[in-house]
Image: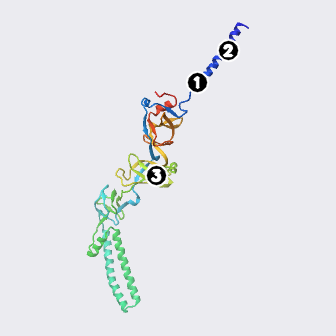
Amino acid sequence: MSTKFKHDCQSFTGLAVITRTSLLLIALSFSFYTPAHAENNVKISAQNLGNLGVMLGKLQAATQVPLLTAPAKVVVPPEQEYVVSASQAGLITKLNAAIGDNVKKGEVLVELNSPDLLSMQRLYLKALSELQLGSVFYQRDKKMLQEGVIADRRWQETQAQYNAFVSEADEHKQLLQSAGMTTGDIAQLAKTHRLSSQHSLRAPITGVVMERMAVAGERIDSLAPIYRVANLNELWLEINIPQERVGSLKVGDTVQIENTDISAKISLLGQSVNAENQTVLARAIIQGKQSTIRAGQRINTQIVQDSDTPIFHVPNTAIAQNEGKSYVFVRNKEGFAVTPIVVIGKQGEESIISGELSADNDIAIQGAGALKANWLGLGSEE
C-alpha cells in the first residue's frame, strides 16, 4: 500500500468520525430544545413583569356585539307632525310664532282677514233661521197630528222638510268649524248675528314650530300651508343599511349614536332596496325625549346586538397576532397562558372578544408584544 493511499484512507475515516459526531450533536440539541410556543405558555416570574412593561387587568364581561356602523337621519314620526293651513283664502294680518317656538294646543298662531268667511257665516245664520222657522211648523203639525186634525201625509212632508233644515244647518256649522271657528265662536255668532272676517288659526297640538311658510301681509289661497308644527317627544332614526348586511340584523337590535349616550331600538327593516345606493332602510325609535339631537340632523350610528354567549371587552393593546390568529395572555401560577380568541368587533380603543375565558381571569392589558416575543422564543424573561 502506497503512502498516499494510506493517507487518503486516514483522512476519509477522520471525516466520517467528524460527520457522525456533528450529526449526533445536532440530534441531541433538537431532542433537548422545545419551541417556547409549543405549550402555549410563557414562563415568567412576577419580579420580571415590570422589566417587560407588562400590566395586568381583569377581563370585563360584555353583553352586546357591535355589528356595523351606518349613517342615519333624525326624523319626526309622521303622526306627530302637523301642517297649519288656511281653510279660506285671505290676507295674513299677524303671525304669532317663529321657528323653534314652543306652542300649546289651541294657541292662536295666525290671524287672517278672510272675506269668504263672511259668506260662510251669513249662510250659516240663514240656515239657522230656516231651522228655527221649520221647528215651529214641526211642533205645530206634530200636535195637530196627535189631535187628528191633519193627515199623515202632511205630517210626513213637514217632518221631511224639518230634517232638511237640520241637515243644512249642521252642514254650514261644520264648514265654519273646518274654517277654524271654535264651538264657542259659532255659538256667539248664533247669539249676536254679528259677522266678522277675522279668522284665527290655532295650533293643532302642543309642540315646536319646525317651519314657517308664509309672512305677515301676504295674501294666500285656500289650503295654503303656513306653519309646520311637530311633537318632538319621540324621534326616529332612518338608517341606510348596506343590503348585504341586512341579514345580520333583527328587530329589537340596539342602535348607539356616535359621541352620545343616546340609544335607539330597531323597529322596522325595510322590504325594498334603494336602487341608487343599494341600501335598505332601517327605522329605529329613540328612547325618551332628547335635547342633544335634532330633527333633520345627520349622524353616525353603530348597531349592536345582544350576545347569547359569554363575551368580553379588552383594550386593543391586550391582543397579540400570530399567523393570522389572535391571542391574549392569561395570568397563571407559572406566568401566562397563551389563549386563542376570536375578535368579534371593535369599539374605539377596545375590542369585543370571545374564547375560553372567565371574568375572573387576569390578563396582560399592556406588554403583549414582549410576551409574544418571549412565547415565540425571540426573547427571555429578563
Circle 3 residue = 253
Query: Splitting the image into 4 quarters, where does residue 316 fall?
Result: top left
Q: Secondary structure at mark 3?
A: loop
The answer for how far apart the CA atoms under marks 1 and 3 are is: 58 Å
The kind of residue on which mark 2 rests is Thr
Circles 2 and 1: CB distance less than 8 Å?
A: no
Residue for point 70% across, 7% down: 3
State whether residue 13 appears in this view. yes
Q: Residues within 10 Å of mark 1 (few under 14, many from 20)?
A: few
Q: Secondary structure at mark 2?
A: helix
Circle 2 residue = 13
Q: Which mark is residue 363?
A: none
State whether residue 67 appears in this view. no
The kind of residue on which mark 3 rests is Asp
Judged left or right of residue 21, residue 45 is left
Query: Splitting the image into 4 quarters, where does residue 18 fall?
Result: top right
Select label 1 or label 3 by which is in front. 1
Judged left or right of residue 256, residue 96 is left
The kind of residue on which mark 1 rests is Ser
Q: What's the image's color scheme?
A: rainbow
Circle 1 residue = 29
Q: Earlier in the sequence, mark 3 or mark 2?
A: 2
Q: Secondary structure at mark 1?
A: helix
Front one among 238 and 220: 238
